[in-house]
Image (cartoon, rainbow, N blue to C red):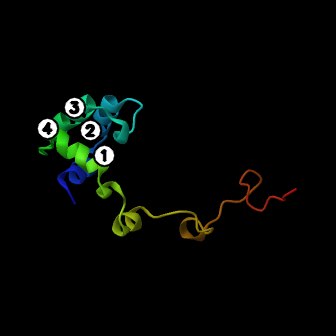
């Protein structure tokens, strides 16, 4: 993993830092961030012990490293298996499960 990836993992694990990232980006995604926003994110990274230059941030965002690898996908994989937690399945009038189709 790169130091940008390490910073991001640390930043999103902390609610206060995640809020600072959101405040910097506003309604933009990280891929839409301006140079000014990336510099501010770099300053935030420095407070957390990561020295990330604007060039490194831009290079990371345009690299294939931003794609999730197999290990990353396995770590976040999920979904509905039809069994729910402990084999329980939501049922009842409001669940939508077992409802007749028209």
Q: What secondary structure is found at the residue carrying circle 1?
A: helix
Q: Which image quarter: residue 64?
A: bottom left
The residue closer to the viewer here, 32 or 95, is 32
Q: Position of residue 69 (x, y in %)?
A: 35, 65
Q: Where, by quadrant of the figure, is residue 89 drawn?
A: bottom right
Question: Quadrant where the N terminus lies?
Answer: bottom left
Q: How far apart are marks 3 and 2 (CA)?
A: 12 Å
Q: Residue at (27%, 31%) from the top-left corner?
A: 37
Sequence-first tag of 3 and 1: 1
> Which residue is pictured at 25% across the width and 32% down the height?
35
> What is the CA distance from the residue labelled 2 to the residue labelled 1?
7 Å
Mark 3, residue position: 40
Q: Crowding near pointer 3: few (<14 within 10 Å), some, many (20+)? A: some
| Rendering coords of residue 56 (x, y %) | 18, 46
Distance of mark 4 from mark 1, alpha carbons?
A: 14 Å
Label 3 residue SS: helix
Disc 2 to disc 1: CB gap under 8 Å:
yes
Q: Residue 47 carries which label?
A: 4
Contact (Cβ within 8 Å) of mark 3 with mark 1: no
Looking at the rendered structure, which numbered label has been put on residue 102?
Answer: none
10 relative position to 29: left or right: left
Q: Which of 15 and 34 is in front in this view?
A: 34
Dot 3 or dot 2, earlier in sequence: 2
Residue 53: which quarter of the image? Answer: top left
Q: Name the residue under label 1.
A: 12
Whichever of labels 2 and 4 marks the residue nearer the N terminus, that label is: 2
């Amino acid at each position: 993993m790169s130091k940008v990836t390490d910073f991001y993992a640390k930043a999103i694990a902390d609610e206060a830092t995640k809020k600072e990232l959101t405040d910097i980006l506003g309604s933009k995604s990280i891929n839409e961030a301006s140079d000014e926003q990336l510099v501010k994110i770099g300053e935030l990274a420095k407070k957390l012990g990561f020295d990330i230059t604007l060039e490194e941030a831009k290079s990371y965002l345009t690299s294939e490293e931003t794609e999730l690898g197999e290990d990353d996908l396995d770590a976040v994989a999920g979904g509905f298996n039809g069994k729910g937690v402990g084999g329980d399945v939501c049922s009842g009038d409001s669940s939508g499960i077992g409802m007749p189709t028209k």
